[in-house]
């Protein structure tokens, strides 16, 4: 279950998207980004990378 405090709304993202002191980590996979577009100034680390590292230590 995702903690609602950790979920950012679209409106909240628009407020911080161009603030250089904020780091935006986009956990969507490549197909999702291709379909919907990149978040400006974000760093993409797909969520499936975390799953891979958890089970392949």
Image: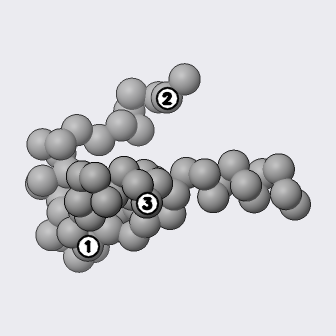
Q: Which mark is residue 41?
A: 1
Secondary structure, mark 2, is loop
Secondary structure, mark 3, is helix
- In which quadrant is the C terminus drawn? bottom right
**Looking at the image, which residue sits at the far top?**
1
Q: Which residue, given by chain and number where applicable, does mark 2 sit on?
A: 2
Residue name at image x 69 percent, y 49 percent = 51
Instruction: Judge the density around disc 1: few (<14), some (14-19), many (≥20) Cα neighbours within 10 Å.
Output: some
Q: Are marks 3 and 1 in contact (CB under 8 Å)?
A: no
Q: Which residue, given by chain and number where applicable, does mark 3 sit on?
A: 30
Which one is nearer the viewer's eye here, 40 or 15?
A: 40
Figure quadrant of residue 11: top left
Q: Residue 17, position in %: x, y?
A: 18, 63
Q: Residue 21, position in %: x, y?
A: 27, 73
- Label 3 – label 1 distance at C-alpha: 16 Å
Which one is nearer the viewer's eye here, 13 or 40?
A: 40
Q: Are marks 2 and 1 in contact (CB under 8 Å)?
A: no
Left or right: 8 in relation to 30: left
Mark yes or no: residue 22 visible. Answer: no
Left or right: 45 in relation to 32: right
Residue name at image x 54 percent, y 23 percent = 1
């Amino acid at each position: 279950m995702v903690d609602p405090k950790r979920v950012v709304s679209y409106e909240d993202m628009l407020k911080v998207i161009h603030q250089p002191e904020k780091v935006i980590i986009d956990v969507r996979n490549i197909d999702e980004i291709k379909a919907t577009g990149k978040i400006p100034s974000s760093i993409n680390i797909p969520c499936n990378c975390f799953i891979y590292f958890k089970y392949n230590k």
